[in-house]
Amino acid sequence: MAQADKSAEGRPFREGTPPMIRMMLLIILFMIMLFSLVANVVGERSGGRRINVIDEFGRGVTNTFNSADRIAPDLSGAIGKVDEGIGKLARLGAGGGEASGFTAATMNISNANFTGVQAAKSVFAGVQINKTQFVGALLDDASFEGAAGAAPNFTKARLANANFTAAQVPGADFSGATLHSAAMRAGDFSGANFAAADLTAASLSGSDLSKAVVTKAFAPGGLFVDTVADGADFTGADLRAAKFTNASLRDVKFAAADLAGAEFTGAKLQGADLTAANGLTAEQLQGACGDASTKLPHGYGLTACQ
C-alpha cells in the first residue's frame, strides 16, 4: 500500500484529477510542442529568428488583458447609461417630475405611479402597464403603441395626439382625459371608461370598445370605422360628424347623444337604442341594419341585418 502511494507521488497528475481535464491538458501541451517545432523549423529555413513559444503565449495573454482595459471605460459608460435610465424611470414612477422625451420601451412598469408626471413626447411603446397610474399626467404626443395591461389609469391625463395604436388595455380609465386627435386604432379598449373624455377627431377605427363607457364624451369628428362597440354606452356624448362606418353597435345606448351628421353606413345596430338621440335623421341610417330589438325614433326604419 505504501509502495502504491509512493508511486502515485511521482505521477504528473493525481488520481483524483478528472480524466477529461487530464486529456485536455495533454492536448494543449502537445499543441504547444508541435507549434514550437514547426515555428523553429520554418524560422531556421527562412533565416529568421527562433521563436520562444512560451514568451509568445505570454505576450498574447498580456495583449488580451490590455484590450480589456481599453474596452472597460466604454463598457462602464454603457452600464452607467442603463443605470441612469433605470433611475430616471424610478423617479418618474414615484410620481411627479418632468421627463420630456423619456423612453421606457419594452419595460414592465405595472403598478407604477406616474401621477402628475410631465412626459410629453415620451415613448412607452410595448410597455406592460397593468394598473399603472397616469392620473393627471401630461403625455401629449406620447407613444403607447402596442402597450399592454389591464386597467391602467389615465384619468384627466393630457394625451393630445398620443399614439395608442394596437394597445391592449381592457378596462383602462380615460375619464376626463384629453385625447384630441389621438391614434387609438386596432386596440383593445373593451370595458374602458371614456366618460367626459375629449375624443375630438380621435381615431378608434378597428378597435374593440365592447361595453366601454363613453358617456358625455366630446367626440365630434371621431372615427369609429370597423369598431366593435357592442354594449357600449354613448349616453349624452357629442358625436357630431363621427363615423361609425361598418361598426358593430349591438345593444349600444345613444340616449341624448348628439348624432348630427354622424355616418352609419354598413353599421350593425341590432338591439341599439336611438330613440332619444339628438340630431339624427332617417337618411343617416340608410345603409345601416338592425333587427326587431333595435329602438328607433318614431317613423324611422332600418334594413334587417343578414
Image (spheres, rainbow, N blue to C red):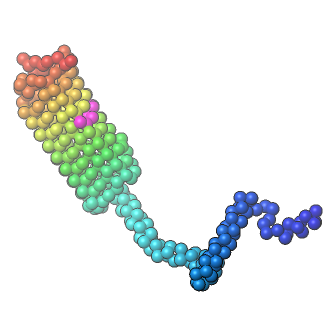
Q: Is residue 22 magenta?
A: no
Q: Does 284 sit left or right of 86 as displayed?
A: left
Residue found 41% across the figure and 67% down from its top: 78
User: Residue at the spot x=16%, y=21% of the render?
Assistant: 289
Q: Is residue 3 visible?
A: yes
Residue 47 vs 288, above or below: the answer is below
Locate residue 34 relative to residue 121 in the image: left or right: right
Q: Residue 222's x, y, as percent?
A: 15, 39
Q: Is residue 192 visible?
A: no
Residue plotted at (8% across, 19% down): 300
Corner quadrant of residue 271: top left
In the displayed structure, 117 sits above or below 81; it is: above
Q: Quadrant of the N terminus?
A: bottom right
The secondary structure making up most of the magenta span is: loop
Q: Position of residue 10 (x, y in %)?
A: 84, 70
Q: Quadrant of residue 270?
A: top left
Q: In the depicted view, which residue is nearer to us: 18 or 237?
A: 18
The percent position of residue 234, horizontal first and vertical second, equals: 19, 32
Q: Quadrant of the C terminus?
A: top left
Residue at the top extreme, as displayed = 292
